[in-house]
Image: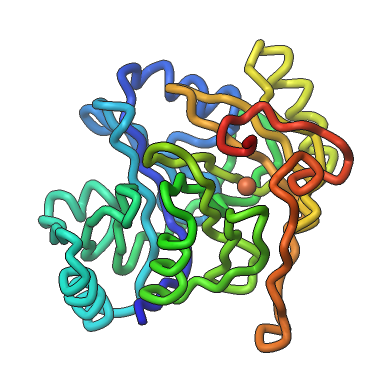
Amino acid sequence: MIALKDVVYCRLGTRDLAGAEWFAVTILGLEVSERRKGATYFKSDNRAHTLCYVEGDPADQVTAFEIGSPAELQRAAATLESLGHRVHYGTSQECDARHVREFIRFDDPTGNGIEFVLRPAVSAQRYHGTRDAGITGFSHVGLCTTDAERDERFWTQVCNARVSDRIGDAPLMRLGTIHHSIALFPFHKAGIQHINHQVASTDDIQRSLAHVRDNQVNITFGPGRHPTSSAQFLYFTGPEGMTFEYSTGVCEIHDEPLWRDRQFHFEPRGFCHWGAKPNIAAFRD
Ligand SMILES: [Fe+2]
C-alpha cells in the first residue's frame, strides 16, 4: 500500500504566464513566492509553494502528493511499475524546480499526471496575499476520471485513500482527517477538474463573490454548501478554463473505524443543499 500523507501542489501549463500570474494574485489572492525562467510559483500557506504555472501546454497538469520516506518512494515506484505504469524518476534539476528532495512521476489509470514527492519544502515566511482573500491553504483537488470504479480502486487499494462519501459514482476521498483531499469526477478525458483553497469564514466566501463578480470572472457554482463535507463553497473559472474553488468549514473525520461512506445523488441536490446549481461540465450528467 502506497501511503500518501497529503496533496502538496499543482503544476499547470499555460500559454500566458503573465495572465496566469495576474489571475492567481489579483483574483485568487495567492502570493508570488518565486519567479524563474518560464515558471511562476505561488504560496497559499506555510509551504514553499502550492501552485506553479509553467509556460507550455495547458493540457500538462500535475498533482503532487507527499510520501514519507525514500524507502517508501522506492517501494511506490516498484509497485507502480509492476502494475504497468511508466515511472519517471525526477532528476536533480527537476527536484529543484519543485522544491522537493526526490520525486517520481507517472500517469494514474485515467492519464492524470501525478507526482509522489519526498520532503516538499516548507517556507519560514508566512503566506500573505496582496488581497485579503482569507485563504488558509491549498486543500484538495478534483481529478477527472474516465472510469470511476477503476480509479477509486487505484487510489484506495494501491494507495491509502479512503472514501468519505460518494456523489453518484464520484468518490470524495481522504488521506488524513480532512473529509477529502482527492475527488474523482467522471469525465471523457484526463485533467484536473478543480483546485480548492480553504478560506477562513463565510465572510471570505461572500467578499470573494463580490470581488470575482466585479472582475467579470465566470462564476460556475455557488455560493452554496456541500451536503457531503458541509463546506460552504464558491466555484469560478481561471486561466485556460481551470475551475478554482474556495471553501470553508470542511468537516474532519476522526472516528475512522466507525465512519461509513454515504451515497449522495449525482444531481444538484447532491452537490448543494442551498439549491445552487452547478454550471460545471463534470458536475452534471
Ligand atoms: Fe472541491
Q: Position of residue 70 (x, y in %)?
A: 23, 78
Q: Where on the picture, by quarter, is residue 76?
A: bottom left
Residue in the picture at 24% in, 26% down? 56
Say above or below: 216 vs 55: above
User: In which image quadrant can residue 60 be found?
Assistant: top left
Judged left or right of residue 244, residue 75 is: left
> Camera-side residue: 191 or 118?
191
Expressed as whole percent of the image width and height from the top left, the position of residue 154 reads 39, 67
Question: Could you tell me which residue is drawn at 74 percent across and 45 percent down?
Answer: 271
Q: Nearer the viewer, residue 69 or 240?
A: 240
Residue drawn at point x = 27 percent, y = 80 percent? 72
Q: Is residue 144 above or below residue 216?
A: below
Count of marks, rendered view: 0
Identify which residue, 18 or 169, lies in the foreground: 169
Query: In this view of the protein, which residue sits in the foreground, 93 or 130?
Result: 93
- Relative image position of residue 77 (x, y in whole percent): 20, 71
User: Looking at the rendering, which quadrant does residue 83 occupy?
Assistant: bottom left
Q: Could you tell me residue 12's position as x and y percent?
A: 36, 35
Q: Which quarter of the rendering shows the N terminus?
A: bottom left
| Colour scheme of the picture | rainbow
| Residue 200 visible, this orientation | no
In this view of the protein, can residue 260 be seen by the observer? yes
Residue 93 horizontal side relative to residue 7, left or right? left
Left or right, residue 39 beside residue 191? left
Q: Would you place residue 49 above or below residue 21 in this image?
A: below
Residue at 30% in and 48% down? 111
Quarter placement of the C terminus: top right
List the single residue furthest toward the right: 274
